[in-house]
Image (spheres, coloured by chain):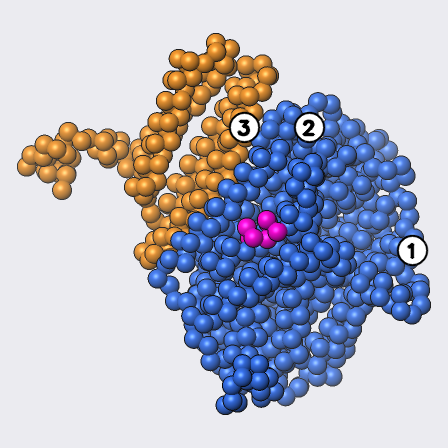
Chain colours: A blue, B orange
């Protein structure tokens, strides 16, 4: 399979280089390298959004979880509906904020809106977290997969560097627009290969699959049921019940963690740099909630059942029957990870360049010099990502585990930016600090460090099987609400009111006063991925309204998932088209200057440091 | 819509984002049909699915043209014709030089598939330009022998 896989990856690289070169040869201003001129084609973001959702879930990890824990793990895919809802709300408002107040990056948007440098620093730290350890972990995983596929003839480290170079070259040549255009094609490829591989596996491999045969989980694990609402255990690493970890609260909180990918700085930056149009609605309703959610809800149990012995065993079997089909399966898993690596490294570096180098370190750079500095930064970052992936895979994995839950802690800040004007800077910072601390200490990063330095903690990862993202966000929101009560009339309220008034005038969409919609959302959430999801265990096989057991032939929980996925798509459609969040229009935008624009100069201590390094006299 | 070089490149990227994955999927399906040792009926189904993928990609391309208010570029038309001619030539060479078993397995599905592509293109032309307009796209003789009367509205209204 090695030559075939190598050829396919080479073709993908050539595709990327071709478009990067075409973009580099356009007579566009040099500054567009960093943001695509803020006019990236809507269709590209339309395809990328579901790809991001799949990247956040981790395709291979999801399939592994389903084959290990059964349908309860597959239930997380219903959360794509919630992901689509969040995308509509956040991308829509952030796009308008970008156009109204000229706030070009996520850090600038939050920093200027709340008047906080600390928030800009937090965004930069998150950017770094996604661009380095998170991406390195994924790159290492992709390389490991390819090493297995090549039977070890090409070692993991060699694959890491080959992949890093193949991703770096197009990014360095073409910048943000090239990365996005190429990733859009990868997302379409993923959208075709995922159902395609499932169908091919069902047709080409002999023997019954799911649902004729249950998912081959370990003994004691409930293959087709959710093991209760909550499990009163210390968490992974301390004690986990043998029936499986995905209780209803574990599912709900894991879905919450999935939103972290949406709050990653690169994702937000994509939402800011896309052009006006109706593609956000199409993307969230039909492609993310509909297609990606449906393919995973319907297809993951089938594919996971065939993958009981691991993805490579399935790929080898498929390869024996149809070589291209086997290679396509491996390619699908690799693309799902490389997609995220390319996106987060390129986006992260460009944000970093704008937020740190251009804003503070070297504010007088010409546009051509800005492009050059971004290219150098891209080269260095891909190098460091490859270095981390090659020689520090464990460190990368441990650090990467906090990326998504930490990003989720940005939720209150973006709710304040887009909807709730009474949330103040102090509330955000207090809540975020506590939320992030709780995330770190309910994930391996904090647990390992604390237990090594001090004493053994009574809890492990995800106490009570609740994801760290939910632990952090619960306390985060609590602090935000309490703090907001006492800072309702903070001095910065005037600026926040101005932006929100402009937002209302530009969007003409109010989130309040939609009682029926939000009531249905709550009911849907409770039953789809909240405590009510356990009703699905037997609702269709042993109906509560009849003494007769139904012979469906498929697990009741699977029917429940399909049903609530379909209901969920209707709700996303409602939000996008009836409420109006699916459309981005520049028609009613009245630009404003938010607060006092920060001076475009280096802080004195930075300027002095730079002057010493460069050997120049301080200006 | 595609009025600047950036817009044209964006459209090109969109078209490629549709065709590249579809072509790969079509290749997987066609290769499975041709190379597998399954019964001829099964092989026919695989090859038919491959042509279905190509036709779906073509439909996607037409939708892109409609949404962006553009048409097929000269390069796209030429590439399509060359790909079609190559496929036709390969089929003919296979019939002439391939084993009987292989010919029996692939001739019918590939031949019908190629015809389906022609039908799809004709259907597109008729829908887009109308029967007379579609015919006029290929009416080279009339283009080369323009007479004043052909410009009259009731004679076709050639400008």
Which chain letter goes with mark 2? A
Say whether residue A298 is visible: no
Is mark 3 in CB contact (under 8 Å) with mark 2? no
Q: Position of residue A440 (x, y in %)?
A: 79, 66
CA neighbours of label 2 inside 10 A, class few (<14), some (14 to 19), many (20+) = some
Q: Position of residue A525 (x, y in %)?
A: 72, 54
Q: Residue at x 51, y 86 (%)?
A: A616
Task: Tell me the tag on residue A238.
Answer: 1
> Residue drawn at (77%, 39%), measured in percent from left and top?
A67
Query: Does label 2 or label 1 sit earlier along the sequence?
Result: 1
| Front residue (pair A588, A474) | A474
Residue B24 on image: x %, y %: 51, 35
Secondary structure of the residue carrying tag 1 is loop
- Residue at 68% x, 46% y is A156
Residue A281 painted magenta: no
Report the mark closest to the observer, 2 or 1: 2
Disc 3 designates what residue? B29
Magenta-highlighted residues: A161-167
């Amino acid at each position: 399979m090695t030559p075939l896989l190598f050829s396919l990856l080479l073709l993908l690289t050539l595709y990327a280089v071709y478009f990067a070169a075409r973009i580099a040869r356009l007579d566009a201003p040099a500054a567009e390298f960093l943001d695509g001129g803020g006019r990236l084609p809507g269709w590209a973001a339309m395809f990328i959004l579901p790809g991001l959702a799949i990247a956040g879930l981790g395709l291979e990890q999801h399939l592994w979880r389903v084959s290990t824990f059964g349908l309860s793990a597959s239930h997380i895919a219903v959360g794509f509906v919630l992901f689509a809802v969040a995308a509509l709300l956040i991308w829509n408002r952030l796009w308008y904020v970008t156009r109204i107040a000229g706030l070009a990056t996520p850090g600038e948007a939050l920093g200027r809106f709340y008047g906080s440098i600390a928030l800009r620093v937090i965004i930069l730290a998150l950017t770094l977290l996604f661009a380095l350890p998170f991406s390195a972990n994924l790159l290492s995983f992709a390389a490991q997969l390819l090493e297995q596929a090549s039977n070890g003839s090409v070692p993991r480290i060699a694959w890491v560097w080959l992949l890093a170079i193949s991703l770096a070259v197009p990014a360095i040549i073409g910048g943000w627009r090239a990365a996005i255009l190429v990733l859009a094609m990868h997302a379409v490829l993923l959208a075709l290969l995922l159902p395609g591989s499932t169908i091919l596996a069902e047709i080409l491999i002999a023997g019954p699959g799911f649902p004729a045969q249950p998912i081959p989980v370990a003994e004691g694990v409930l293959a087709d049921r959710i093991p209760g609402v909550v499990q009163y255990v210390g968490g992974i690493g301390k004690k986990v019940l043998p029936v499986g970890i995905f209780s209803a609260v574990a599912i709900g909180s894991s879905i919450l963690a999935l939103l972290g990918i949406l709050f990653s700085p690169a994702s937000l930056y994509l939402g800011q740099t896309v052009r006006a149009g109706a593609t956000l609605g199409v993307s969230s309703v039909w492609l993310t909630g509909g297609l990606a959610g449906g393919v995973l809800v319907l297809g993951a149990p089938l594919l996971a059942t065939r993958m009981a012995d691991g993805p490579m065993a399935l790929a080898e079997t498929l390869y024996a029957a149809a070589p291209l089909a086997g290679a396509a399966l491996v390619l699908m898993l690799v693309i799902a990870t490389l997609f995220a690596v390319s996106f987060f490294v390129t986006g992260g570096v460009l944000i970093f360049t704008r937020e740190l180098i251009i804003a503070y370190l070297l504010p007088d750079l010409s546009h051509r010099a800005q492009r050059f500095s971004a290219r150098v930064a891209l080269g260095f970052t891909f190098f460091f990502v490859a270095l981390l992936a090659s020689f520090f895979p464990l460190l990368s994995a441990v650090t990467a585990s906090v990326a998504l839950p930490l990003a989720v802690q940005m939720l209150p800040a973006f709710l304040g930016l887009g909807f709730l004007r009474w949330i103040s800077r102090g509330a955000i910072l207090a809540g975020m600090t506590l939320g992030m601390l709780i995330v770190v200490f309910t994930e391996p990063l904090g647990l390992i460090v604390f237990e090594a330095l001090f004493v053994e903690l009574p809890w492990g990862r995800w106490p009570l099987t609740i994801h760290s993202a939910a632990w952090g966000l619960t306390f985060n929101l609590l602090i935000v609400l309490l703090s907001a009560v006492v800072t309702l009339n903070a001095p910065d309220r005037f600026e926040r009111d101005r932006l929100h008034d402009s937002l209302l005038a530009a969007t003409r969409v109010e989130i309040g006063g939609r009682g029926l919609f939000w009531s249905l959302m709550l009911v849907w959430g409770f039953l789809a991925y909240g405590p009510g999801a356990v009703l699905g265990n037997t609702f269709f096989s042993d109906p509560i309204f009849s003494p007769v057991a139904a012979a469906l032939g498929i697990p009741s929980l699977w029917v429940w998932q399909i049903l609530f996925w379909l209901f969920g798509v209707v709700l996303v459609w409602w939000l996008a088209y009836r409420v109006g969040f699916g459309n981005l229009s520049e028609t009613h935008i009245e630009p404003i200057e938010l607060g006092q624009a920060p001076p475009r100069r280096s802080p004195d201590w930075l300027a002095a440091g730079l002057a010493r390094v460069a050997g120049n006299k301080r200006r | 819509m595609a009025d600047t070089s950036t817009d044209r490149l964006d459209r090109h990227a969109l078209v490629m984002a549709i065709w590249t994955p579809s072509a790969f999927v079509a290749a997987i399906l066609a290769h499975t049909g041709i190379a597998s040792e399954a019964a001829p009926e099964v092989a026919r189904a695989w090859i038919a699915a491959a042509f279905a993928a190509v036709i779906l990609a073509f439909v996607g391309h037409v939708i892109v043209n409609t949404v962006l208010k553009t048409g097929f570029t000269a390069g796209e038309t030429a590439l399509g014709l060359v790909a079609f001619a190559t496929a036709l030539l390969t089929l003919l060479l296979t019939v002439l030089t391939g084993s009987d078993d292989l010919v029996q397995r692939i001739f019918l599905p590939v031949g019908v598939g190629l015809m389906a592509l022609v039908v799809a293109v004709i259907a597109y032309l008729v829908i887009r330009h109308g029967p007379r307009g579609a015919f006029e796209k290929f009416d080279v003789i009339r283009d080369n022998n323009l007479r004043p009367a052909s410009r009259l509205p009731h004679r076709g209204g050639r400008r």
